[in-house]
């Protein structure tokens, strides 16, 4: 074939490709801070397999667990510079980019699984996701149930007074300071990957996380008490960068659908695990303390509608009315 004929044939091939709208091959990096044995990682791997299958291999997702591409703050920043393409992250970390979307992670705002499901499907969540997209260019593709956060310690925590001066690890985000500050504890922001060793060495006295996280991070090995404060019902967001989605062509809708399905798949697994774990921890010899939440709620309530919260009172009332 002559050079002229080869060039002509190549042009025809590219024209045909453009006409069909077929997506070019894309390789995306999905980064998160959770262990390989967690439901979050297992579901991300499932989603990667499903995407490859349903796009006939045109889109490949590689999952990087356990902070291997950076801690939570770093992977959030990585979306903006193209270091990562998809992440799991908490609304509390996204708050620094678009405050209102963090509303669901504030203490005692969410009332339980059913309330969370309604929020996930609500116009309010859609509007807040759109606001985050406008502020950052990144896209919220799913909401994941992370569970109710409880305080672990080496002593019973039954009243707010029991937390006075307690050096408690919290994620490095502003809203996570509200609960410990309201009960006069000593909040200590720290990366997730550093918590176990900090508890083991006595750098901090306590931490707070949902029961499934306490199990898969093995915090119960270095804390004798789990106190069922339920002070936050936590979520994760599945977020993709605009650059990542722009590579997908006609496969974008498929990828969006699969990642939202993955978010719900992980949510159901975590919720079911929550129901079973009190008995499991008790069998391991851990003291699980039932807690009257009302005194803790009373301590926090004035702060939820005070100055400085990133959401509006309209957001607050709409979420409460769901």
Image: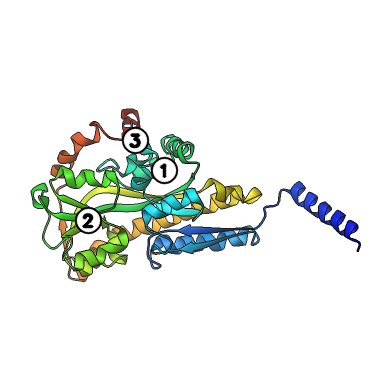
Q: Does label 3 or label 2 sit earlier along the sequence?
A: 2
Residue 173, percent from left and from top? 30, 47
Neighbourhood count class around disc 2 (C-alpha, 10 Å): few under 14, some 14–19, many 20 upward: many
Residue underneath mark 2: 169
Q: Is residue 116 left or right of residue 57?
A: left
Residue at image location 20% in from the left, 64% down from the top: 199
Residue underneath mark 3: 319
Residue 153, percent from left and from top? 16, 60
Instruction: Look at the image and name its color scheme.
Output: rainbow
Q: Does label 2 or label 1 sit earlier along the sequence?
A: 1
Residue at image location 40% in from the left, 67% down from the top: 36
Q: Calculate the distance from the C-alpha at mark 3 to the C-alpha at mark 2.
A: 28 Å
Which label sits in the foreground, 2 or 1? 2
Near-viewer residue (181 or 145): 181
Residue underneath mark 1: 120
Q: Quadrant of the C terminus?
A: top left
Residue 123 versus residue 19 in the image, above or below: above
Q: Calculate the distance from the C-alpha at mark 2 to the C-alpha at mark 1.
A: 28 Å
């Amino acid at each position: 074939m002559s050079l002229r004929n080869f060039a002509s044939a190549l042009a025809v091939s590219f024209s045909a490709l453009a006409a069909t709208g077929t997506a070019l091959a894309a390789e995306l990096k999905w980064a998160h801070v959770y262990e390989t044995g967690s439901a979050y990682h297992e579901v991300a791997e499932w989603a990667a397999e499903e995407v490859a299958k349903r796009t006939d291999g045109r889109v490949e997702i590689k999952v990087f667990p356990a902070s291997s591409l950076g801690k939570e703050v770093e992977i959030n920043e990585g979306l903006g510079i193209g270091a990562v393409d998809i992440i799991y992250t908490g609304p509390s970390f996204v708050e620094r980019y678009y405050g209102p979307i963090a509303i669901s992670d504030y203490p005692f705002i969410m009332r339980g699984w059913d309330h969370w499901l309604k929020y996930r499907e609500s116009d309010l969540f859609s509007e807040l996701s759109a606001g985050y997209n406008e502020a950052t260019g990144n896209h919220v593709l799913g909401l994941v149930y992370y569970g109710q956060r409880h305080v672990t310690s080496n002593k019973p925590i039954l009243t707010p007074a029991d937390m006075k001066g307690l050096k408690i690890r919290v994620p490095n985000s502003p809203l996570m300071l509200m609960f410990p500050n309201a009960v006069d504890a000593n909040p200590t922001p720290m990366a997730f990957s550093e918590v176990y060793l900090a508890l083991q060495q006595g750098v901090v006295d306590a931490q707070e996380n949902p029961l499934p996280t306490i199990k898969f991070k093995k915090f119960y090995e270095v804390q004798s008490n789990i106190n069922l404060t339920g002070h936050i019902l936590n979520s994760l967001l599945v977020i993709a960068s605009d650059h990542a989605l722009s590579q997908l062509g006609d496969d974008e809708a498929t990828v969006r659908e699969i990642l939202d399905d993955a978010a719900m798949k992980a949510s159901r697994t975590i919720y079911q695990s929550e129901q079973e774990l009190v008995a499991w921890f008790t069998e391991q010899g851990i003291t699980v303390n039932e807690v009257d939440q009302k005194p803790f709620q009373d301590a926090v309530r004035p702060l939820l509608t005070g100055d400085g919260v990133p959401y509006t009172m309209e957001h607050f009332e709409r979420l409460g009315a769901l």
